[in-house]
Amino acid sequence: MRFDEKIKQMLGKAASEIGQELSRMGVQGQAELGSALFTGNAYVPYGQGQNRDGAVHGMEGQQQEVQQDIQRENEGHSL
């Protein structure tokens, strides 16, 4: 892959991630505005709902990979 193609690919990925983050922030802003209008308080407890699914699954996937690596190592030593 040429350098300019790599740059285009990286910029496209970055633009996609920025768009997703702005979308998430927009949803949070809507929740805060709605809360402020209807309750007089803009505080909204986001909790775990603000985490992106990919980030959560990414960590679980990494943990599974580590466990599989450990299991493979243990099986290799028992032979």
Image (tube, rainbow, N blue to C red):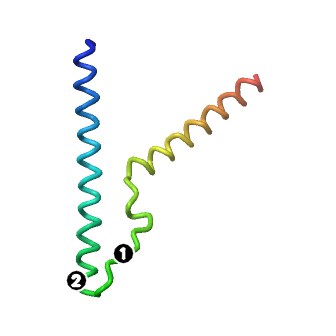
The 10 Å Cα crowd at callout 1, few under 14, some 14 to 19, many 20 or more, is some
| Whole-percent x, y for residue 63 in the image | 56, 43
Q: Say which of 76 and 50 sits in front.
A: 50
Query: Across the whole image, how many numbered discs are drawn on residues?
Result: 2
| Whole-percent x, y for residue 58 in the image | 45, 44
Task: Please indicate whether residue 37 sits to the left or right of residue 73 in the image.
Answer: left
Q: Say which of 40 and 54 sits in front.
A: 40
Q: Kindly give the residue lying farthest to the right in the view shown.
A: 78
Q: CA distance from mark 1 to mark 2?
A: 12 Å
Task: Please indicate whether residue 79 sits to the left or right of residue 10 in the image.
Answer: right
What residue is shown at x 22% (from left), y 25% (from top)? 8
Q: Quadrant of residue 71?
A: top right
The 10 Å Cα crowd at callout 2, few under 14, some 14 to 19, many 20 or more, is few
| Whole-percent x, y for residue 75 in the image | 70, 28
Kindly state the secondary structure of the residue where label 2 is placed. Answer: helix
User: Please, what is the three-letter code of the amino acid marked with disc 2?
Assistant: Leu
Q: Say which of 73 and 11 sits in front.
A: 11
Q: Which residue is mark 1?
A: 44
Judge whether 40 appears above or below 15 on screen.
Answer: below
Q: Quadrant of the C terminus?
A: top right
Q: Earlier in the sequence, mark 1 or mark 2?
A: 2
Q: Quadrant of the N terminus?
A: top left
Q: Which residue is mark 2?
A: 37
Judge whether 49 appears above or below 4 on screen.
Answer: below
Q: Badges 1 and 2: C-beta atoms under 8 Å apart?
A: no
Task: Please indicate whether residue 79 sits to the left or right of residue 52 in the image.
Answer: right
User: Please, what is the three-letter code of the amino acid marked with disc 1?
Assistant: Val
What residue is shown at x 26% (from left), y 49% (from top)? 20
Kindly state the secondary structure of the residue where label 1 is placed. Answer: loop
What residue is shown at x 50% (from left), y 45% (from top)? 59
| Whole-percent x, y for residue 77 in the image | 76, 24
